[in-house]
Image: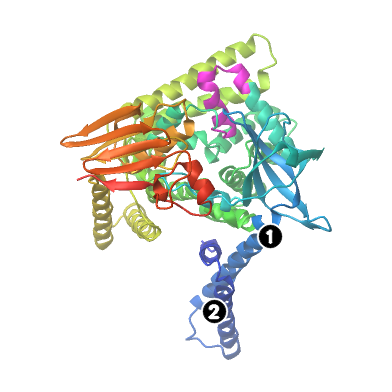
């Protein structure tokens, strides 16, 4: 695989640029110096024809060249993105590429910046902005060109356990900042039409049509399967897919693109008299590119489209295709286009899963010979799931802190029903205008979607379906990933037992299990930063949540759910607080009392106040203030949740 050292060097260069923020000049100088030394070594070898000169220096030179290329590429991208401070209180211009209405009645729009003006001159601006409008009097649609002036702020993470890493996500998706903007500070000045906007509008139109054709209980799943948009899925259903390791079916990726390609090629087969095989392949490539853009052009989709395009090009040129080289080439192409793709979790999981399938699926499948055709088909699909899970396990533990124990069962459900559901959805899009026939397709689509959801929920309800609470740092993630990859390679490819590597792997498992058990043994009370008073109590392997009796607050409920998931324990009780409450934990008693400006909490002889309104005293702990007070008094500080041990 000649592309492997090149790709590794390129990826390493991107990573070095990412982690060396603030010291990029010094790091770039070191990389350049090493590359120059390698080139001088090659020149020396060429002039003096030294046979003792290591041949690996050539590979090292190419690797360092691409490392420098990856480093420079990300540095250029970072330099091109505007700074939120330079755009604050300036007149900025941008095009809406995403729009969403919240349940609370606000509209949030995502803008792609084009230029900024300080009143005297205009300069080019680059990056994305999110603006939340205070009224729905003026509605903004995809493609609208708007001008706005407001003070921007950077994305900041919440400090509650298990909260969404906003800084990482938005920082790696070219977002500059965000703002809550008054309606008189923004206006529409025109519209833009381009291919991206056309596909975004088409995507929204298809999503709206799907919601009108299908009942609400399954329409969100249908939209996610076809377009990758999971915004309308019920949270409990989404959790079931996450807990069983079946989330990949809701994220449009290689699975969907492969199925679409098979369907297109099958349909084009009927026109073989008029279309040659090469023309059919080219036409299929054009169609899957259209599907990729239609589904939102996520990194996983574009990765699949690029890879299938490379495979198709090989067929047209009548050359043998090396799956791993094609995969590596598609990664290099995508990272050259946008090096920040490397930090997209979907991109990572997609590529690592495919690497696992290409390396381990065939050896795993050959371990158990099956004679019955239907069992052989199921085992072949299960081998794919096992191979992908082996490769993605370190990433699941690192990013999601959990592992789906019954992934094989959910894989069978997805394998049996996923293709059928996606096929019906595609047929529905193209035949919705046909009377009576569309009713039949809608009925079959609804039945198949319901069967898929019920199947996943049944797997999720099996006790012990998910192991959570894992907490790995980046170094531990790298060590475990390297050991797992090496052991799997030796066992399945070389068919030898790597004794020392297996011992190291067992030690790693013992270590992360020990860390997990320590996490379970904590006895503490935590009060979170939220719009409402809420928190959790962890005591002797149990988790209780408490929150004040207010109108349904989705943000608060999600905060509590994230914290429970982060603890790794199952929720044992939820307590809705009223004016006066007492929670007994064996011989311990915690009292919550509602006061005029907040809550008073009594724990044995300790007493503390959580303030939600008014002006706090100077000595009042920052952690015991509501989210609104924290943001107004300590805007630029990251305040951790209040936490106290329970003896």
Residue 255: horizontal and vertical position, in percent? Answer: 52, 37
- Percent across and percent down for residue 155 are 56, 50
**Quadrant assignment, res 200:** top right
Question: How many numbered discs, if any?
Answer: 2
Residue 360 in view in this figure:
no
Residue 530 figure quarter: top left
Residue 142 lies left or right of residue 243; in this view the side is: right
x, y (%) of residue 93?
Answer: 76, 47
> Is 294 or 50 nearer to us in this picture?
294
Main SS of the magenta part reads helix
Front residue of 317 and 490: 490
**Viewer-nearest residue: 576 or 130:** 576
In the displayed structure, 532 sits above or below 179; it is above
Q: Is residue 149 magenta?
A: no
Task: Tell me if mark 2 has few (under 14), some (14-19) or many (20+) residues whose alpha carbon lies within 10 angstroms of its own.
Answer: some
Where disc 1 sits, the SS reads helix
How far is mark 1 from mark 2, CA to CA?
27 Å
Q: Quadrant of residue 382?
A: top left
Label 1, on which residue? 80
| Secondary element at image label 2 | helix
Residue 200 visible within the image: yes
Q: In the picture, which quadrant includes the C terminus? A: top left
Q: Which residue is mark 2?
A: 34
Which one is in front in this view, the residue at disc 1 or the one at disc 2? 1
The residue under the point 67% across, 18% down is: 431
The residue that appears at 57% across and 22% down in the rendered structure is 424
Left or right: residue 301 compared with residue 115? left
- Choose between 499 and 598: the one closer to the eye: 598
Q: Residue at coordinates 51% horizontally, 24% vertically from top-left?
A: 420
Identify whether 584 is placed above or below 603: above
Q: Which residues are magenta?
A: 210-230
């Amino acid at each position: 695989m000649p592309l492997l050292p090149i790709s590794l060097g390129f990826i390493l260069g991107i990573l070095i640029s990412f982690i060396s923020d603030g010291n990029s000049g010094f790091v770039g100088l070191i990389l350049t110096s090493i590359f120059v030394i390698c080139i001088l070594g090659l020149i020396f070898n060429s002039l003096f024809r030294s046979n003792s000169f290591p041949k690996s220096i050539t590979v090292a030179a190419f690797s360092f060249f691409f490392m420098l290329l990856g480093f420079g590429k990300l540095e250029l991208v970072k330099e091109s993105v505007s700074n939120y401070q330079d755009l604050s209180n300036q007149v900025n211009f941008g095009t809406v590429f995403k729009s969403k209405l919240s349940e609370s009645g606000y509209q949030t729009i995502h803008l792609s910046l084009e230029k900024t003006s300080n009143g005297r001159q205009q300069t080019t601006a680059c990056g994305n902005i999110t603006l939340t409008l205070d009224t729905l009097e003026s509605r903004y649609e995809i493609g609208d060109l708007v001008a706005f002036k407001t003070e921007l702020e950077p994305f900041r993470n919440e400090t509650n356990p298990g909260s969404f890493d906003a800084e990482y996500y938005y920082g790696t998706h070219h977002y500059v900042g965000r703002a809550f903007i008054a309606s008189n500070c923004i206006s529409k000045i025109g519209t833009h039409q381009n291919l991206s906007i056309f596909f975004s509008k088409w995507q929204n139109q298809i999503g709206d049509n799907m919601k009108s054709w299908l009942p609400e209980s399954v329409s969100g799943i249908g939209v996610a399967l076809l377009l990758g948009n999971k915004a309308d899925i019920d949270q409990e259903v989404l959790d079931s897919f996450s807990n069983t390791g079946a989330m990949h079916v809701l994220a449009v990726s290689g699975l969907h693109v492969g199925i679409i390609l098979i369907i297109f090629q099958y349909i084009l087969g009927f026109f073989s008299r008029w279309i040659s095989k090469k023309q059919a392949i080219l036409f299929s490539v054009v169609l899957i590119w259209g599907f990729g853009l239609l589904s939102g052009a996520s990194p996983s989709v574009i990765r699949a489209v690029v890879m299938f395009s490379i495979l198709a090009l090989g067929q047209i040129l009548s050359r043998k295709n090396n799956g791993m080289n094609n995969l590596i080439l598609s990664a290099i192409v995508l990272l050259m286009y946008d090096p920040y793709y490397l930090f997209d979790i979907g991109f990572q999981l997609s590529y690592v899963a495919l690497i696992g399938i290409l390396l381990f699926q065939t050896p795993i499948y050959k371990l158990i010979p099956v004679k019955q055709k239907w069992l052989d088909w199921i085992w072949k699909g299960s081998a794919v799931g096992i191979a992908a899970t082996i490769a993605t396990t370190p990433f699941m533990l690192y990013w999601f802190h959990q592992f789906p124990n019954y992934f094989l069962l959910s894989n069978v459900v997805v394998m049996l029903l996923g293709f059928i559901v996606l096929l019906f959805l595609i047929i529905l899009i193209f035949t919705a205008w046909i009377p009576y026939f569309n009713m039949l397709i809608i009925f079959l689509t609804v039945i198949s979607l319901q069967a898929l959801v019920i199947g996943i929920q049944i797997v999720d309800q099996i006790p012990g379906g998910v192991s959570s609470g894992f907490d790995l740092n980046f170094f531990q993630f790298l060590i475990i990933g390297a050991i797992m990859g090496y052991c799997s390679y030796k066992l399945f490819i070389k068919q030898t037992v790597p004794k020392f590597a297996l011992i190291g792997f067992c030690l790693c498992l013992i270590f992360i299990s020990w860390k997990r058990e320590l996490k379970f043994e904590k006895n503490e009370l935590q009060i979170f930063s939220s719009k409402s008073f809420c928190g959790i109590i962890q005591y002797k392997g149990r988790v209780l949540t408490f929150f004040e009796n207010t109108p349904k607050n989705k943000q608060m409920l999600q905060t509590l759910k994230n914290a429970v998931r982060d603890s790794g324990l199952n929720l044992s009780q939820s307590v809705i607080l009223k004016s006066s409450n007492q929670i007994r934990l064996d011989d311990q008693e915690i009292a919550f009392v509602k006061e005029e400006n907040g809550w008073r909490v009594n724990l044995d002889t300790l007493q503390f106040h959580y303030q939600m309104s008014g002006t706090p005293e100077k000595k009042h702990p920052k952690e015991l203030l509501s989210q609104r007070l924290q943001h107004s008094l300590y805007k630029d500080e990251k305040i951790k949740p209040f936490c106290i041990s329970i003896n």
